[in-house]
Image (cartoon, grey):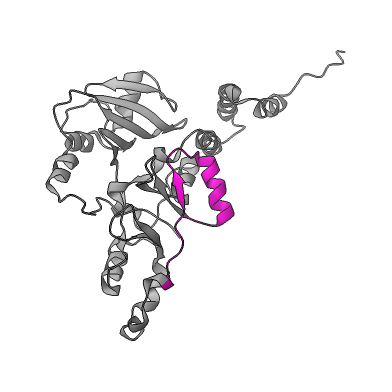
Amino acid sequence: MNTETKKSWLSTLKDRFFKKKDERTDLLEDLKEAQRKGILSLDSLMMIEGVFQVSEMRVRDIMVPRSHLVVIQQSMGVDDMLSIVANSGHSRFPVVDESLDEVVGILLAKDLAHYSDEDSRDSFEIKDILRPAVFVPESKRLNVLLKDFRESRNHMAMVIDEYSGVAGLVTIEDVLEQIVGEIDDEHDAADVTNIRRSGFQLYSVRGLTPLEEFNQYFDSNLSHEKFDTIAGLVSFELGHLPERGEELTLGNFHFKIISANSRRINNMQVSLLSGTESKPVESQQAEKSEPGSVKPVSPVSASD
């Protein structure tokens, strides 16, 4: 009998898990094989894939962009602040001075609730209830950010660009959703934003965005008789369910997969190619608004 014991599948998997980053593809293939054999559940596989992606993704990939921020002006009265809190339904708000680039702190809705009655408003000073704002660069990796969130017990951070201007914000929920998938709360049904502008001719698009909504937003005419979502169309054109980092040019659009798992495309980055004649509906509306105005297109989702 051969004295060398053949390695079990589990032992091989364990050996590969601790190898270098460039061997992760082999590890993921082993995990997918384990899922096909019933050793690993599909949900577990998707979460492991999410963990790998979090270590490669950066804050800019998932942040809520500047144009979508719901903020509170430091000079506002209590009534106006309470109105914003009630209408958005969120729990944390950046407080700014004269512009979005002047963030003076973070306001928690529960702290403002103490001043909901008339008698307590005479003593109201917003500086007394502001929490310090945390700032992170766009280039920060999500696994590092998640570690920082856990250690500091912060749930939200302002994202700054290379010029120290506010580019957006990111929450711990945004990071966790890359691992476990969408986390729905009581406000998500009304607040889901499938398409968000993240830069010049650059957009963040959810995979489940209906083609009809995509075409309406970009004034385009992409279509396919078998697919209703933009993710379905992109997967069909590529000929397979794509992985993170894969790219596709389709018409006047360039798609880059930002987040995906064994079952679906979660998020894509969509670039408008130079020479594109039509402008997104949102861009046309934005040009009509006053310069410097702070008007959110969709409230920020920030959980307690």
Judge left or right: residue 279 versus residue 166: left
Q: Position of residue 69 (x, y in %)?
A: 31, 52
| Residue closer to the observer: 149 or 35 | 149
Can you say which quadrant of the picture contains the N terminus? top right
Q: Nearest the camera: 80 or 162?
A: 162
Place residue 92 in its image quadrant.
Answer: bottom left
Magenta stretch holds residue 134: yes
The answer to which quarter of the image holds residue 190 is bottom left
The span shown in magenta is: 128-155
Q: Please determine whether, in this image, residue 224 is positioned above or below residue 146.
A: above
Identify the residue at image location x=30%, y=74%: 78
Of all residues, the one furthest to the top in this rendering is: 2
Q: Residue furthest left?
A: 288
Question: Was residue 142 drawn as part of the magenta stretch in this picture?
Answer: yes
Image coordinates for residue 258, horizontal then vertical, percent: 40, 32
Judge by depth and name the residue closer to the eye, 105 or 107. Answer: 105
